Image (spheres, coloured by chain):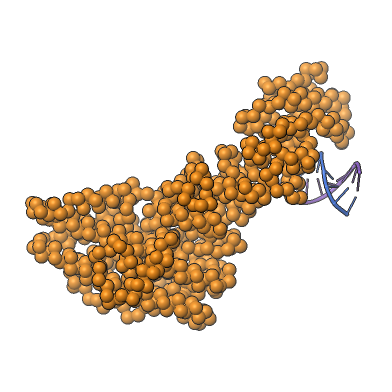
Chain colours: A orange, B blue, C purple
Amino acid sequence: MFDEPITSYSNGSIISHLLRKTIHTKRALDESHFYLPNLAVSSSTMADSSQEDQSSISSRDSAAESASPGSHLSTGASPEEDRPLSDHLQAKRARVENIIRGMSGSPNSRLHGENERAESDVREAREAYRENKRKQRLPQHQEHHLTPPAPSNRGSSGSKDEECHKLKEQLQSMQRLLRQLQEKFLQVYNQEGTECEGRDDTGAENEDATTGKESGFVFPMSTDDESERTSDRAKGGLPDRAKTGNLFLTHQKESGNLQDTLKHELCKAVSESVDMVFKKISSTGLKQSPAQRMCPRPEHISVGADRKSQEDGNQEQSHTEETGKPRALEYYESTETRSAEGQTEALSLVVRKPPLSQLSSVTPTVKRPYPLHHSPFQFNYSTPLHDSQILEHLLKYGPHTSFGTLPCMPPSMDRASPDSVERPWDAIAMRSKVTSSHLAHHPCPSGLGPVTVDSLCLPHVKMECGDLQSMAERNSYMSLNIQEGLTPNHLKKAKLMFFYTRYPSSNVLKTFFPDVKFNRCITSQLIKWFSNFREFYYIQMEKFARQAIVDGVNNVKDMSVSRDSELFRALNMHYNKANDFQVPERFLEVAEITLQEFFNAISTAKDSDPSWKKAIYKVICKLDSDVPDEFKSSTCL
DNA sequence: TACAGCCCTG
DNA sequence: CAGGGCTGTA
């Protein structure tokens, strides 16, 4: 039954696979193949994931990253490949049991209605289900290169042992539930089989050939495409059957419908059970040191390879399934269902939530050998503070939903960036940069178009749906109210103020940046800005003055500055790039005076004096005019 | 000594 | 645009 490379299937597809196989063999299955002696794999996997957190995170991280996990898994060169196949199967079975258990808490689950045998377990699962409702669909974390040593060997804490024990028990109960589910499924199927007489074999094979290919390896999550198909079947199922005209078709539809429904439930349950496990583990991990909290390598490392291997076996299916599938769902699939052979437990599918200090060691090294369009966003990186809320929201409701429901998010911030492109992995690198340095000190509100992105130092960062970028912008918006730093809007405002004042005093700055919490650093930065503005200004003046002299201009009166002149265009481009500000006439006058000063100085060879410009500066600094009061408003821009 | 401002550099 | 060095000034 398991002689085919089942290990290359994803954890999601394994469910379909098991079901399909179960049907196909019609109870010929020996339970002992399925039900393995102990839970050593899964429990040790659990222990290992947390335990590795304690001991060898950084080294293993780097090793995992450099080891190109994709090829590692797809080629089957892993040492785990040599492990008894039963280990994987058992672990996966445990995982499925976990899923089934989660389903038992779902009101929609009717296929496995009575679970008296595992009543207490079900209750526990329900509680866990409720507990983790809010965290469902978190990206999962897989550990493919685990080498599971005994937790006690490395002195894991007692609470962790306890957690592992609990999880072990849960897994056992889930195994039982899975068996029940399989039996149920078989019952239903065989009922239909007898009804449909000799069709059974054909139907089973057909199931294998069609349904299996069609949806057996991905979760039929309620995408438009899939739900449409499902509802079609639901609509057509019973009536068709009554017609008896096409019993074969009827049977197919019903099985497909049932299977779809079942898989849909399983799909939901996967997220929930994974979240449940993660929650348990993370709660344990919080007691550890920051370094220990570092989780094993993120799941996405293997995703590309997994996907590839999966597609190798199910190319037609993948193509048909993926068209019209929301990105978010694809992402979940990619993380959930495309695990490879080492994937043993939901436990290891953990979202890392290290403290900020861990960011630099986590994010920059991530590589992703993954088709660009397959992963809309990555949330495996750390999620401090409100980011985590945003991520949670995204994970719960998908990337296309509004953030308006988030209490901390003004509804207006919900729009996605227009220039978003699918570059999820760049987004990873972006995030570390943004979080570690720029967002904190240079929050950047949107509204400046490309400037915004550049100012955030995100020139190569493109995010599908604008999720991450808009997230960054939301960060900026929120910071805008805190005003612990200067924003690009402040810079823009300062540049416009330069049209009035070239040498603003500290008091002027404080007056005209009332929304800025001034300290020595901020003041220096603002002063530096104006210093830079002046620098550019004078450089332009000198350049044009010299050019005029080269061009043979003799009379200083020929040196004028109008809105048509090149000099003005250069200055306007610098200080008023958007050209949405009417430059005051006074600035033209000052510019003209400055240009003439330079012209005179250069024509009289004063520029031989190293400090010849100082005299000009002395003149120009007296030409400042008052900045309009409109600039005092913090919302003027 | 502290600070503002300029210059140079990246 | 920012950082750092340098200079002039109070």
At 22% from the left and 49% from the top, the residue drawn is A232
At 14% from the left and 65% from the top, the residue drawn is A191
Give the side of residue A332 with respect to residue A216, left or right.
right
Residue A109 appearing in the image: yes
Give the side of residue A280 with respect to residue A23, left or right.
right
Give the percent coordinates (x, y) of residue A397.
Answer: 41, 53
Q: Nearer the viewer, residue A287 or A435?
A: A287
Give the side of residue A53 with respect to residue B5, left or right.
left
A388 versus A555 height, above or below: below
At 19% from the left and 59% from the top, the residue drawn is A255
At 58% from the left and 46% from the top, the residue drawn is A477
Image quadrant of residue A451?
Answer: top right
Q: Nearer the viewer, residue A135 or A340?
A: A135
Give the percent coordinates (x, y) of residue A130.
Answer: 39, 65
Q: Quadrant of the C terminus of chain A?
A: top right
Give the side of residue A324 with respect to residue A194, left or right.
right
Q: Quadrant of the N terminus of chain A?
A: bottom left
Report the label total: 0
Give the percent coordinates (x, y) of residue A205.
Answer: 17, 61
A596 versus A383 height, above or below: above
Give the percent coordinates (x, y) of residue A223.
Answer: 33, 51
Q: Residue furthest bottom?
A: A153
A566 versus A497 height, above or below: above
Q: Nearer the viewer, residue A370 or A343?
A: A343
Q: Nearer the viewer, residue A194 or A218?
A: A194
